[in-house]
Amino acid sequence: MRRLTVVQLLPALESGGVERSTLEIAAALVAAGHRAIVVSAGGRLVPALEACGAEHVTLAIGRKSLAALRRVPALRRLFRDSGADIVHARSRLPAWLGRMALAGLPVTRRPRWVTTVHGLNSPGRYSAVMASGERVVCVSRTVREYVLRHYPATDPSRLRVIERGIDPAQFPPRPHPDPAARAEAAAGYPTLADAAPLLLLPGRGTRLKGHADALHLLAALRSAGHPRAKLWLPGAREAGREAYIAELEALAAQLGVADAALFTPPTARIASAYAASDLVLQLSRKPEAFGRTVLEALSCGRPVLGWAHGGVGELLQQLQPAGAVPPFDADALATTAARQLRDPPAPVAIPYTLQAMQQATLDLYAELAG
């Protein structure tokens, strides 16, 4: 295949699943001999992007204001001067600006247009731009069904389901129990040393992640045969979320589990955190588009318990049905958790790998580029 130039558009390169996917595709493009350009307002992931051989163009295309329209001519020049073959938008405002920039180019010199629907955004005209691509990447079957339901005029042949993937080398199977991983966790947080069992809920400090549901589950388990159960919530404690943490701590005290719930900042060693745990929770109150933590935990050999909706429910039904619980049924959650702790499901092979996701995306680019 001839050398392609692919431009990806997103608001910033700070953190998150969209940003991670952008870097992963940029790295795959460079490794295959193509040119990868990313346009964003910048952020802490720019050095990692450039280290893989990709290029970054700093342009504030994610700030919602009329001033954003001033970025359209700069985008148009970039598309023209770089000889872009593909423009791939990963967020709504960058997608609108990208479409405007493309419309000003002659048809014969216009790059092909790709969008990825990373989330289940509120349907409407503003979000509809994410279904406008000549190819629309859906990160799960849940997302594909969402697009067709809310934008019925979308031609299904333009949709491509390319599930997010993980690198199995970063999440290798670990013994269960794993004394080394537990010792590492206890070295940072001594209260975790005697947890039996240890529940883990990784996630940002937002109400949508279901931290309160996890606290209620912890209380139920401790009163029903697991008095030493503890709950670790890495990522819950974040700057600017102090009021939310105080609310959770008050709830933990009310439930009698204040000494058994640990709210910490994110950990850079999440694979070891999975290995230290006995049960991983995915209790997002709002359906998610995918659910990468489900794959990561299962890859490490840990059972996962989650609400059976959205992308999380899709993955659990496919890979570990025993962990799927009807959304917000607290009694079923406690019963299922006790059963998983008593009789953990057998480890499963993870079909959704980073390499498969990268190759499927490059194949899509090749298809469009002819």
Image (tube, rainbow, N blue to C red):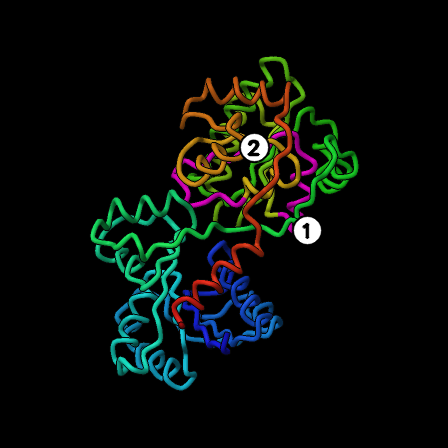
Give the numbered dot on residue 89. Answer: none
How much space separates mark 1 and mark 2, taking CA atoms?
20 Å
Q: State which region is magenta.
A: 267-292
Residue identifier under label 2: 304
Residue at coordinates 50% horizontally, 24% vertically from top-left?
216
Helix, strand or loop at mark 1 = helix
Mark nearest the camera among 1 and 2 is 1
For residue 155, what is the image quadrant?
bottom left
* Residues tagged 1 and 2 counted as in contact (Cβ below 8 A): no
Helix, strand or loop at mark 2 = strand
Give the numbered dot on residue 169. Answer: 1
Amino acid on which the number 2 mark rests in the picture:
Val
Magenta-colored stretch includes residue 287: yes
Judge whether 260 appears above or below 10 on screen. Answer: above
Horizontal and vertical percent position of residue 128: 26, 56
Of 8 and 64, nearer the camera is 8
Residue 140 can be seen in this image: yes
Judge whether 135 appears above or below 161 on screen. Answer: below
Judge whether 146 appears above or below 176 on screen. Answer: below
Horizontal and vertical percent position of residue 274: 65, 39
Q: Of the residues under marks 1 and 2, which one precedes in the sequence?
A: 1
Residue at coordinates 68% horizontally, 51% vertically from top-left?
169
Residue at coordinates 41% horizontally, 25% vertically from top-left?
326
The C terminus is located in which quarter?
A: bottom left
Horizontal and vertical percent position of residue 125: 21, 56
Amino acid on which the number 1 mark rests in the picture:
Ala
Of 362 and 76, nearer the camera is 362
Magenta-colored stretch includes residue 236: no
**In-image side of 364 versus 345 (left or right):** left
